[in-house]
Image (spheres, rainbow, N blue to C red):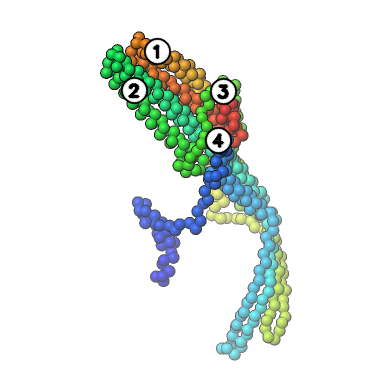
Amino acid sequence: MSGCLHFTPERRIDTAVASAASAAPPELPAPATRPGKPALATLAPPAGKTLSLAALVDFALRKSPLTRAAWYDARAAAAQVGSREAAYYPVVEVDGQVQFQHQTAFGGKVVSDSANWGPAATLSYLVLDLGGRAADVDEARAQLAVANFTHGAALQDLVLKVEQAYYQLLAAKALREATASNLREAETALEAAVGRQRAGVATLADVLQAKTAASQARLTLRAAEGLAETAKGVLSAALGLPATFELEVGELPATVAVRDLDKSVESLVAEAERQRPELAAARGQVARAEAHTRSVWSAGLPNLLFAGSANRQLYLNPSTTAYGDNYGAQLLLRVPVFDGFRDTYNNRQSEEAVQAALARVEATEQQVVLQVWTSYQALRTATQRVGVARDLLDSAKASADVATGRYEAGAGTLVDLLIAQAALSSARAQEVQSRADYLVALAELAHDTGALGPRSVGRAAQGEATP
């Protein structure tokens, strides 16, 4: 008995998990097999070329464990539909048995030994259930629709994640080049200050100020290089690759095809309500809950069953080789009368679950509208910023050119030159970020309206996609 205590439920639980919430869990054996990793060779760009956004998205869709998990969930839901539909078919079972029996009576004076064997077959079929099977099938089909919509949402989320990481990497690379230009201009200003000091027309303070500006530009360049490497790791992780994987991507477009939105926010919201898979999945949960309610309700109704059986017993006694055949059939009417109000509570539970699913649909609709509104306003702002940032950059370049010429000619001060160069550095950074923000905002609005997918990636990469 003490040995059996080891197999009690409490003992099994205590030995399978940590001894307390604050304790470390027990060491678990390593899995026999490890999940396979993506084939990195398939992501190599053609010779002399860089990886396009479309290629990156295609790789992520094929290799991402998130989309793969959602796909397998959908396949499991499809198998569940077949399992529920099996209730419409009869159940046939074939058995075989071998039996030996020894009996004694009257103090052992009468001894009887018998041995027999034989096959048996049974058939059962639910003739009538007043809608229970149909409700179960409808529930499974609704769950399949939910799984498919969830898979679609996972695909759209992954595409957006890759696009965001891709454009941020391009922006980081462009910002690195912009800061490199700032450093070159700062070093040019330093050389000019040193030359003017040697000619006796500038002070040591001018040289020190120019050297400080050059050091600051060098420090900014190092930070930009670090941001570019970090962005590369973020993109690799979005693709399901190690952060250390080397990616060769292109450059941020020098210009983007900025266009004003030709649709109102109301029409975009209407598109989102039709196309967003998350919203469709929430509505599918309502259909599933309603079908479950019908299934629970039918459990308290009468049903009619048919059962039939047939078997043959062959006797192996030495005195006889006779056999016997048995068969029978029955029609069973089952009428539930009282079950402790279990069906009543189950009905109430399923009805409340329907109301909860309806409330989640309403919450999802509100969230979708908010996302579309936010993305719409973000894209409008990003569209305006592209033109303003370009004008700012042009004026900052002209101002810096004038300040450089005046300083080299001895008509301007070093302070004026440094101020103009600082303004140019800031304008470059803002102009680069405005282009990247526009492309990201375009992708986010397409995602929030449910229009973002693998087919729209190529157009979005050129700034041509319209939500």
**What residue is shown with label 3?**
257
Label 4 is placed on what type of residue? Answer: Gly
User: Between marks 4 and 3, how big is the CA–CA gap?
Assistant: 26 Å
User: Between marks 2 and 3, how big is the CA–CA gap?
Assistant: 36 Å
User: Between marks 2 and 4, how big is the CA–CA gap?
Assistant: 37 Å
Marks 1 and 4: CB-CB under 8 Å?
no
Dot placed on the residue nearer the N-terminal end, 1 or 4:
4
**What residue is shown with label 2?**
213
Task: Label 1: state its secondary structure.
Answer: helix
Could you tell whether 232 is left or right of 333 in the image? left
User: Between marks 1 and 4, how big is the CA–CA gap?
Assistant: 40 Å
Quarter of the view holding residue 278: top right
User: Between marks 1 and 3, how big is the CA–CA gap?
Assistant: 34 Å
Report whether residue 168 is seen: no
Task: Label 2: state its secondary structure.
Answer: helix
Rendered location of residue 293, percent (x, y): 59, 46
Q: Nearer the viewer, mark 2 or mark 4?
A: 4
Residue at (30% x, 19% y) in the render: 207
Label 1 is placed on what type of residue? Answer: Gly
Tell me if residue 205 comes above or below residue 91 in the rendering: above
